[in-house]
Amino acid sequence: MTLPTPVPAERALPDPRTLFWWVLGGRLLAAAVLLLLALGAWAGTPGIRWMAGGSAAYAVLLTLFASWFLRPGVRPGDLFHALQASADIVLVTVLVYGAGPSSGVPSLYILVISVYALLMSFGGGFAVALAIVAAYFAASMLPEPTRPGLAFWAQIGVFLTAYVLVGALAARLRAAGLERESLASELRRVRLEADDILRNIRSGVMTVDDAGRLAFINPMAERLLQIDGEGVVGLPVLDKLKLRSPELWAAIVAAIRHGRKVSRGEGTVLHEDGRIFPIGLSTTTFERDSDGRPSVTAIFTDISDLKKLNELNVRAERLEAVAALSASLAHEIRNPLASIRSSVEQLARSAHGDEDDRYLASLIVRESDRLSRLLSEFLDFARVRATEFVPVDLQAVVTAAARLVREHPDCRPDIEIRVTGSRIVLDGDEDLLHRVVANLLLNAVQAARGPTLVSVTTRPARPADLPIGSVIEQPVCLEVKDTGPGIPEELRDRLFDPFVTGRVGGTGLGLAIVQRAVEAHRGLVLVDTAPGSGTTFTIFFPARRITEDAA
């Protein structure tokens, strides 16, 4: 897709190549006139008849040479034009000689002077003008040698004046032509740069005229809207746009009808396969001078990743608040619980032979221990802090965590844990990284319903792999992917919230701890899941700590 090309303005004069072809056409016409005169009016005068025939033949030969020489890409110089000018001077001189200097034929010299002043440099054109003066002198003096009169010198003055005027005009035209070529070259460069930008930016750009016809659309807009731009440019597009994105359609229509612009709007796009995603949009209008009616340019971007980042930020803030509350409650409950447990144990020892009292005491002790373990998990969640950042081999951490989870009682023989990828070194807290990998692997193992493959991959990442709007310096990627049943739809929006679990007996703190540990490393965790298609957790970590984090 390229930028619209403006219609070039009409030329005041033909280009030099076209002008010279006109010269060749006029030369052939003059040669034909000479031949007719040689065969008619001058047939009784052998001298002039032979001069006319010879000059006509000379003109035709030079015309054929010029036609062969002027191949595409060839730029003739002054020497070529001087040779061609000789043919035109000879033709006009023979006509002047035959018609007489006092006739109107010498005015043809002015035409020759003007043409070659435009085609040649100032010095070359001046040489042609001097040759014409000499030819006119010869044509005037040969029939009847006399002393040149006032009319002769006036004619010479006209020739030279014509050359000075046309030569000056030609010089200005050449300067203007060079400037125009420079501007045209600059315009082509700017157009190519703009076209390259519009091809590669991650925003859709489309222009709709006042009649609702598509004037321009870039490749990203074609992909976002699923519109074949080449097929609909110049055709009405608003009806199709209304089906794809009602909000974008409404913004463009409001701009066309009322000139209303949108600075920061939002909408959605619906694809034919049913996929819906949010977009951010803005519109601007450009009025045409002809009728004042505007065309509208809309710029829009898929903001799905930005929405995800906003959700991640809100989730991190919520987790931080819950962590502070959990730590406070755990400390407040843990000490009284320990006192209750100790007191019950003493009462159980003082109960002599009463089975019911001992059973109740053991029940209280067991439940106290369970509550104590739960409080320990709350404290673990609240204490997720990176205490020491050192260079850590992420591949080694993954290997150790996988070995630990393979030995877990919930890891059945039909579950395979596979570690792939390359050695990645990053600045991090090894204990937190180990907890991240172990929690994700254990979740995948405990969610498995049959034979399942859980793969863990470490690899370098590129900034382009990150969601739009996120900034992580020197990103590295940790990916945990399983072929399990996927995450139920009712849990997806609250997946990283504390105490949310789909497993009986689970505390719902595993993924919350993962989220906080990743946040402690200034990283980013994304999840992709579908029922029956498994789940993929993708985590991006910065390979190096930035100065502010280290402070």
Image (spheres, grey):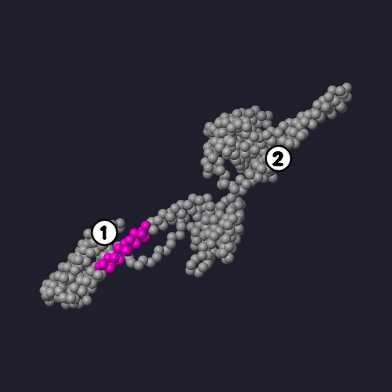
Residue 547, percent across and down?
56, 37
- Residue under the image location 51 percent in, 65 percent down: 287
- Residue under the image location 36 percent in, 66 percent down: 11
Q: Residue at label 2?
A: 322
For the residue pair 415 and 185, the one nearer the viewer reads as: 185
Callout 2: helix, strand or loop?
helix
172 versus 413 height, above or below? below
Q: Residue 330: say if magenta.
A: no
The kind of residue on which mark 2 rests is Val
| Placement of the C terminus among the 4 image quadrants | top right
280 left or right, relative to 18: right
156 versus 446 height, above or below? below
Mark closer to the observer (1, 2): 2
Q: Residue at label 1?
A: 76
- Residue under the image location 41 percent in, 54 percent down: 189
Q: CA distance from mark 1 to mark 2?
A: 84 Å
438 left or right, relative to 336: left
Regarding residue 43, the answer to whether it shows in the image is: yes
Residue 350, percent across and down?
86, 23
Regarding residue 29, the answer to whether it shows in the image is: no
The residues colored magenta run 163-182
- Residue under the image location 68 percent in, 34 percent down: 383
**Location of residue 25 by image quarter:** bottom left
Q: Residues within 10 Å of mark 1 (few under 14, many from 20)?
A: some
301 versus 253 height, above or below? above
First in sequence: mark 1 vs mark 2: 1
Callout 1: helix, strand or loop?
loop
**Location of residue 470 by image quarter:** top right
The kind of residue on which mark 1 rests is Pro
Q: Residue 165: say if magenta.
A: yes
What secondary structure predominates along the stretch shown in magenta? helix
For the residue pair 489 and 334, the one nearer the viewer reads as: 334
